[in-house]
């Protein structure tokens, strides 16, 4: 049915008010406040032994990575501090449409491994094998992988067991008393409630306090005793060596003798003795030169050379003349090195005589 002006009067049931909806008929939407998820560390090389359970119920998303989250972040993060884990390695989120938890690899280098819980013996740790599945290749993000109860997820050297309970009650394995894994790492100082009386409790480390007390007591004892401790006392190693191996016999002192010899006047040096050569000896017949000359017709007592030039032939060898003063070549005064003084003193005297001093 239509009216003038193009307005239609078609009936649509969606325009009707459905009326009040009772709480019993309201369907369950599977919100994050009712999604139960806990992670139990089966084995890990980096997590402390006291950290075993991560409580993630009520959060729509949780991250796994190597770095700390930014200050003031509202998304929890399980921090695994090792190089095999990327900065943001993987993410688990609650899929409200499918009402299940899903895991996504965020393009990590070393990968995220998933293992179904039905193939794992609860009495033993999971062993690597064909049942482990890598979610995606290196540096490639993966598709969401649904998580089931008792599935195992391996990131780096840490393996987590997934605990999803429909009744939202933890079992004995995932119940947390004091072994909870921290999922928020805010380093900002938190505001503490102050006491109206002005008293503020200060947390101290008992071990450090005991060490400081020991050091202070030892220092007071060392100051009161007076003498310096043996660690700062001088050690005479020479005295200890003499006690162990004995001392050497005393050596004669050379210092006084030197000073005494210098204090005495210099004695006059004795005159040099003229060297005397040994008397000439006849060359034996075993001499090589003697045998060669004999073969050429020379006889002992004869001169060498031709008989026509006999005046220049020498029958006796030339005698060596030695200089008694041994002044050397070019010396004009044979007494330069005599008892009158050394040649330096004689040279000075000549210079003085020439200058008329």
Image (cartoon, rainbow, N blue to C red):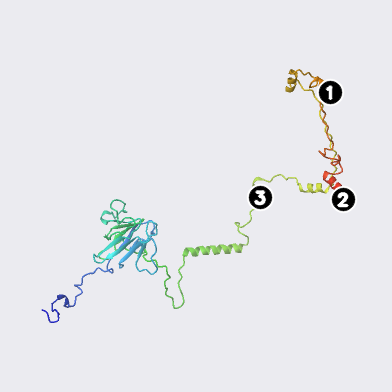
Q: Residue furthest front?
A: 308
- What is the x, y in percent for residue 34? 27, 68
- For label 2, the crowd category at 10 Å Cα-Cα, with few meaning under 14, some 14 to 19 and many 20 or more, is few
Alpha-carbon span between mark 3 and mark 2? 63 Å
Residue 56 visible in rendering: no
223, above or below 200, in the image: above
Residue 54 spot, x, y in % from top left: 34, 63
Q: Are marks 3 and 2 in contact (CB under 8 Å)?
A: no
Mark 3 and mark 1 in contact? Answer it, CB < 8 Å: no
At 26% across and 54% down in the image, what residue appears?
119
Q: Residues within 10 Å of mark 1 (few under 14, many from 20)?
A: few
Cα separation, mark 2 vs mark 1, equals 53 Å
Up-down relation of residue 149 to residue 194 (above or below): above
Along the viewing direction, whichever of 40 and 219 lies nearer the viewer: 40
Q: Nearer the viewer, residue 120 or 223?
A: 120
Label drawn at residue 311: 1
Tell me which corner region of the image, top left, top right, bottom left or bottom right, holds residue 324: top right
Residue that mark 2 sits on = 355
């Amino acid at each position: 049915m239509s009216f003038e002006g193009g307005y239609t009067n078609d009936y649509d049931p969606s325009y009707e008010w459905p009326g009040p909806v009772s709480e019993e008929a309201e369907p369950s939407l599977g919100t994050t406040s009712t999604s139960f998820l806990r992670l139990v560390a089966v084995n890990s090389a980096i997590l402390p032994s006291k950290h075993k359970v991560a409580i993630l119920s009520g959060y729509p998303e949780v991250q796994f990575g190597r770095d700390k989250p930014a200050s003031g972040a509202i998304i929890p993060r399980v921090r695994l501090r090792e190089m095999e884990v990327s900065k943001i390695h993987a993410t688990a989120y609650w899929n409200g449409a499918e009402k299940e938890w899903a895991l996504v690899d965020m393009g990590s280098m070393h990968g995220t491994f998933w293992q179904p819980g039905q193939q794992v013996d609860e009495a033993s740790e999971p062993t690597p094998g064909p049942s482990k599945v890598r979610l995606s290749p290196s540096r490639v993000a993966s598709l969401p992988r649904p998580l089931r109860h008792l599935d195992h997820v391996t990131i780096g050297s840490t393996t987590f067991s997934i605990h999803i309970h429909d009744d939202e009650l933890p079992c004995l394995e995932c119940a947390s008393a004091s072994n909870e894994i921290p999922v928020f790492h805010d380093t900002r100082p938190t505001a503490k409630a102050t006491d109206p009386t002005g008293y503020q409790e200060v947390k101290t480390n008992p071990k450090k306090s005991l060490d400081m007390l020991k050091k202070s007591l030892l220092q007071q004892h060392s100051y009161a005793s007076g003498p310096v401790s043996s660690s700062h006392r001088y050690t005479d190693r020479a005295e200890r060596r003499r006690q162990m191996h004995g001392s050497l016999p005393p050596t004669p002192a050379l210092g006084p003798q030197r000073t005494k010899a210098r204090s005495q006047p210099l004695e006059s040096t004795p005159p040099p003795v003229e060297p005397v050569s040994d008397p000439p000896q006849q060359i034996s017949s075993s001499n090589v030169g003697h045998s060669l000359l004999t073969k050429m017709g020379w006889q002992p007592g004869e001169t060498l050379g031709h008989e026509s030039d006999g005046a220049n032939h020498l029958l006796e060898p030339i005698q060596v003349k030695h200089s008694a003063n041994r002044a050397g070549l070019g010396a004009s005064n044979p007494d330069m090195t005599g008892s009158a003084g050394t040649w330096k003193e004689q040279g000075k005297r000549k210079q003085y005589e020439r200058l008329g001093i």
